[in-house]
């Protein structure tokens, strides 16, 4: 993983190499090792790399089961954004602190107040939709929309390229393409 990319993560990462396994959405199960971990995300090294937007369940020694969506990937690694309750986040923070020697308070993240903004979503077929973007981080966002799109669909949101991830009751998750050569479209 590149260490030159600015770190805009919501919580501090601990460089723990924990062994485990992960399961992809198709049921395939593979061995892995963490590169680093936090209460909101995990970077995983493996021979098989999950796709952007794919739902992954990881079973890690010392931490247990963690579910998430793939938000970044590279050659031999991928990173998931953990999706769990605040209660579970606090328990994971205590485990990470015990393993890394960090303070559990330094590892926890306060719940983020939802920031909602209006945006225009454009499909690959040239259709435009007015949407609301919520819970946006550097790599992903939740999109409230009247339209349903299939996971893996390529879209732009206000000119930024993205891939549709999992579905929710009032919209879907998107993962932004933050590759250095990808620029805001005109």
Image (cartoon, helix red, strand yellow):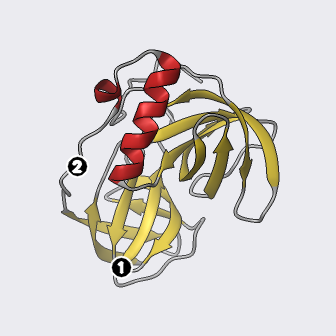
Horizontally, residue 105 falls left or right of residue 21, namely left
| C-alpha gap between disc 2 and disc 1 | 19 Å
Which residue lies at the image location 34% right of the left edge and 21% below the top edge? 103
User: Looking at the picture, how far across and down is residue 100, in whole percent?
Assistant: 49, 18
User: Mark 1 packing: few (<14 Cα in 10 Å), some, or many (20+)?
Assistant: few
Q: Residue furthest bottom?
A: 146
Q: Earlier in the sequence, mark 2 or mark 1?
A: 2
Image: 150 above or below 85: below
User: Looking at the picture, how far across and down is residue 36, in whole percent?
Assistant: 55, 26
User: Mark 2 packing: few (<14 Cα in 10 Å), some, or many (20+)?
Assistant: few
- Quadrant location of the N terminus? top right
- Front-most of 42 and 147? 42
User: Looking at the picture, how far across and down is residue 157, in whole percent?
Assistant: 36, 60
For residue 23, which numbered disc appears in the image? none
Which residue lies at the image location 48% right of the left edge and 40% below the top edge? 41
Q: Is residue 67 visible?
A: yes
Q: Please identify the quarter of the rendering in which residue 169 is found.
A: bottom left
User: Looking at the picture, how far across and down is residue 121, in whole percent?
Assistant: 36, 68
Q: Is residue 183 visible?
A: no
Which residue lies at the image location 29% right of the left edge and 72% below the top edge? 131
Image: 15 above or below 57: above
Q: Please identify the quarter of the rendering in which residue 2 is found.
A: top right
Q: In what element is the residue under mark 2? A: loop
Q: Nearer the viewer, mark 2 or mark 1?
A: 2
- Front-most of 133 and 42? 42
Image: 58 above or below 123: above
Q: Which residue is mark 1?
A: 170
Which residue lies at the image location 63% right of the left edge and 54% below the top edge? 56
Q: Which residue is mark 2?
A: 112
Q: In what element is the residue under mark 1? A: loop
Horizontally, residue 153 falls left or right of residue 142, namely right
Q: Does the residue at mark 2 contact the one at mark 1 (Cβ under 8 Å)?
A: no
């Amino acid at each position: 993983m590149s260490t030159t990319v600015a770190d805009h993560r919501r919580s501090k990462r601990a460089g723990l190499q924990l062994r485990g396994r992960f399961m992809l959405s198709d049921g395939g199960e593979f061995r892995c090792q963490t590169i680093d971990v936090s209460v909101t995300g995990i970077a995983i090294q493996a021979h098989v790399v999950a796709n952007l937007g794919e739902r992954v369940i990881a079973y890690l020694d010392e931490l247990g089961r963690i579910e998430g969506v793939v938000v970044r990937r590279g050659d031999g690694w991928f990173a998931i954004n953990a999706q769990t309750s605040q209660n579970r986040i606090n328990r994971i923070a205590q485990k990470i602190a015990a393993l890394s020697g960090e303070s559990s308070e330094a590892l926890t993240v306060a719940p983020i107040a939802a920031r909602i903004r209006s945006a225009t979503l454009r499909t690959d077929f040239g259709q435009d939709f007015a949407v609301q973007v919520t819970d946006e981080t550097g790599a992903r966002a939740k999109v409230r929309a009247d339209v349903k799109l299939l996971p893996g669909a390529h879209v732009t949101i206000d000119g930024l390229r993205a891939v549709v991830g999992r579905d929710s009751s009032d919209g879907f998750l998107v993962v932004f393409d933050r590759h250095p050569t990808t620029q805001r479209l005109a």
